[in-house]
Image (spheres, coloured by chain):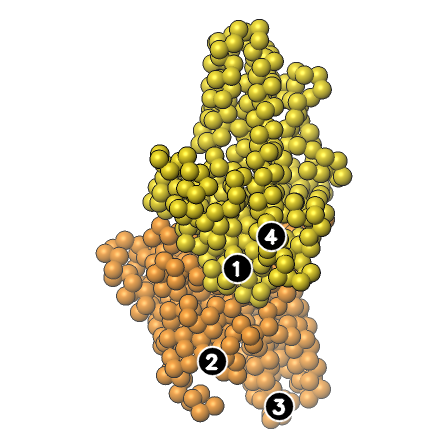
Chain colours: A orange, B yellow
Amino acid sequence: MRVAGKAYRTIWPAGDGRTVRVIDQRRLPHEFRVAELATCREAAAAIREMWVRGAPLIGATAAYGVALAMAADPSDAGLDAAAAELAATRPTAVNLAWALDAMRACVAPLRPGERAAAAFARAAAICDDDVAINRAIGANGLEVLRGLSAAKRGAPLNVLTHCNAGWLATVDHGTATAPIYAAAEEGMALHVWVDETRPRNQGAMLTAWELANEAVPHTLVADNAGGHLMQRGLVDLVLVGTDRVTARGDVANKIGTYLKALAAKDNGVPFFVALPSPTIDWSVRDGLAEIPIEERDAGEVTHVWGRRGDGGVEAVRIAPEATAAANPAFDVTPARLVAGLVTERGVCAASAEGLAGLFPERRAA
Amino acid sequence: MRVAGKAYRTIWPAGDGRTVRVIDQRRLPHEFRVAELATCREAAAAIREMWVRGAPLIGATAAYGVALAMAADPSDAGLDAAAAELAATRPTAVNLAWALDAMRACVAPLRPGERAAAAFARAAAICDDDVAINRAIGANGLEVLRGLSAAKRGAPLNVLTHCNAGWLATVDHGTATAPIYAAAEEGMALHVWVDETRPRNQGAMLTAWELANEAVPHTLVADNAGGHLMQRGLVDLVLVGTDRVTARGDVANKIGTYLKALAAKDNGVPFFVALPSPTIDWSVRDGLAEIPIEERDAGEVTHVWGRRGDGGVEAVRIAPEATAAANPAFDVTPARLVAGLVTERGVCAASAEGLAGLFPERRAA
């Protein structure tokens, strides 16, 4: 997608064939910086220190990390060391483990002299696959938006989204944002309500920045506002991403998603979830009972990152020193609140039957 | 209530009989400052610039503003000018208009030489009445808490609250906090989940500070977390204040309250609202259709107040410059989601019948 009018992905090989470039997302939206990764160690640091974030982008960065390692030391020992270093960066990220397995499967059978080129090619393919999946999600979600837009008789379709399931979390297009960008590209009148998404403010800092760069009309709101907007008829569709979907359609996503799903149900607003199919965890059915919820640092709640008047960026303290905070990072939205799942294969009901219809090869599993 | 172990109200007459003191709430929780108000103009500024906030405290400050005016110029012209200056500070505050009417009714019939002393006495009575009402709310709400606490078999009762309906918004005790302070005083095991309450963070900045000073166990959470906490059985009761209750029990309160009420309903958690009876607007029935919602400055959403590492306090920007924000300040929780209303007369159902039972003199109206 575009940054100040120029097209970018979040990660790409540099022209020299030996290094990789990423958007350093740490100071967005206040500062846009492209960083060069020349070694596996730098790729690992970019993941660990969250220059890059979002499950698909973490996987892609790990893939290129292996490629950078193979360029430096294509031995079996070099491969093992690279995989170990990268795996340790964000231990809970499913895409990270998947990407490392894929890279090893590609590289291990080859002679050392062939490994670097093959690894760069495989990493590029992983990136291209992510883009293709997100494009398909965009095309499938666009059908949903078109249907709702038709009823608006030319008035803008109001979409509410939570957190950042945008192109910055993937290689390009994003998941929940892909249908929005597809709709904007075809000239649909639409407007996006962007939830701030405390405590890390990914909505205010990343989604709003993406939409501004794509010139998609949008308005930032506090996470508290969505229910009121729906009561007043100002939301036509809620569209979010997800970190994990169970085999029966329960949806784990950024904390606060469940509250928006409840408000959508109470006001007859359709609540859709966009996801690449690897996000489906076929081994789990009951999201509330079976998905562990990560508890993150309390400092994210007691402090807020922002830009000072003098231009510097820091985390200011909002709470009294004597006050402790809790910081559950995700919640689970029961399938009964979800109108549909938008995948690269199509849109289905959030149910075991709906998912089995789109993914029949999983039915026997 | 206590600040660093010493008992305070939010407003009180100084020992000299000519000035009034208030807690300057603007830099809480980072800085505690007592300010002296010596003139009506200073009282008006304290209201307008939000040294004091909360409907009951605004009314009390306006009352003392009239008293300060009468000490300087007890003429009819002086009374008119004071009332006009104070009325213009926060035009939508119902308690402000009520307090000014009460002061005029007390002072106007008197000779100028008698007015100052009478005005100070009437302002003190308004303050004492507020404290008595809140004590009664505390005693009535305590019965609700006792009932729920009994089922916990000694485990702490978990109360979730939103915004600041605390003693800082009143003269003392607060409304939603009054039952909590009463329960803590009698030694009940309890713990309070404090919603941050974006965009102005009254939960993080005021409620948490109050609870810390009273040594009530509490934990700050992002507004997004409450639904998840309820799903996990970690909330036994939601208890909030309100800005306006309709004759059938719809509740207007700080933006985001409705989302918590939905989550409470979905998880079988009782959702109670504490209020002094003047908060009931008997002229209105349908809260959604009839209560206008104030739209506040977008800068409250794009920026967050906090303390920098160097100790200074400022509002840092979290959003891109190109991003606009919307800032509805209140939402309406339909009566169907409210388990009960806690008033100074007792607890009743959130319905026309429930309210008529407690306030039979209004039935004929």
State the residue position of label 2. A247
- The answer to whether residue A311 of the structure is visible from this angle is no
State the residue position of label 4. B145
For image coordinates 60% across by 18% down, the residue present is B120
Lower position in the chain sequence, tag 3 or tag 2: 3
State the residue position of label 1. B269
Mark 4 surroundings within 10 Å by alpha-carbon count, few (fewer than 14), some (14 through 19), many (20 or more): many
Do marks 4 and 1 share a chain?
yes
The chain letter under disc 4 is: B
| Mark in the foreground, 3 or 1 | 1
Q: Amino acid at mark 2?
A: Ala
The chain letter under disc 3 is: A
C-alpha span from label 4 to label 1: 13 Å
Of the pair A169 and B192, the residue shown nearer to us: B192
State the residue position of label 3. A108
Of the pair B84 and B106, the residue shown nearer to us: B106
Q: Amino acid at mark 1?
A: Val
C-alpha span from label 3 to label 2: 33 Å
For image coordinates 60% across by 43% down, the residue present is B138
C-alpha span from label 3 to label 1: 55 Å
C-alpha span from label 2 to label 4: 40 Å
Of the pair B216 and B342, the residue shown nearer to us: B342
| Mark in the foreground, 2 or 4 | 4
| Mark in the foreground, 4 or 1 | 4
- The answer to whether residue B112 of the structure is visible from this angle is yes
